[in-house]
Image (tube, rainbow, N blue to C red):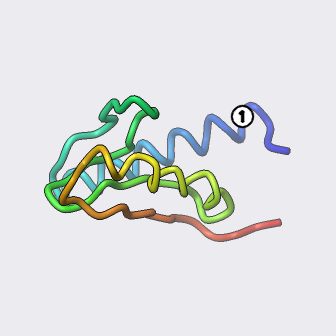
Amino acid sequence: MRSRQGNLVTITTVMRVQRTLQAREGGEPLVATPAGFVDLVTAHDVVEIRQVSDWQSGLKVLVYAPYFPGRKPRLHLFGGYTN
């Protein structure tokens, strides 16, 4: 179980990765859908950003993708895996 401080570090890191990807690939961050918020939507992809150890929660990109026809779902993983 992650501590509250651990969650804050992860959220901050996700936001940093999100900004870096947006600068490199363009797109809009935190796009609302009826199913929730997508981390980044680019011209070609619907991107969910997650730490490697939290990859399962990133699979929700498959729920978001149908709201963006013509774009591919993409799970962008960062960091190493620790037990």
Residue 24 relative to residue 55: left or right? left
Classify 35 as above or below 68.
above
For image coordinates 64% across by 58% down, the residue present is: 56
Amino acid under disc 1: Gln
Q: Quadrant of residue 70?
A: bottom left
From the top left corner, tell me how far across and down residue 1 is, in percent: 85, 45
- Mark 1 highlights which residue? 5
For image coordinates 30% across by 44% down, the residue present is: 67
From the top left corner, tell me how far across and down residue 49 is, in percent: 46, 54
From the top left corner, tell me how far across and down residue 82 is, in percent: 76, 67
Q: Quadrant of the C terminus?
A: bottom right
In terms of secondary structure, where does tag 1 sit?
Answer: helix
Task: Looking at the picture, tell me which residue is in the foreground, 55 or 12.
Answer: 55
- How would you rate the neighbour count of disc 1 (Cα within 10 Å): few for under 14, some for 14-19, many for 20 or more? few
Residue 75 relative to residue 80: left or right? left
For image coordinates 20% across by 53% down, the residue present is: 42
Q: Quadrant of residue 8?
A: top right
Residue 70 relative to residue 7: left or right? left
Residue 8 relative to residue 60: left or right? right
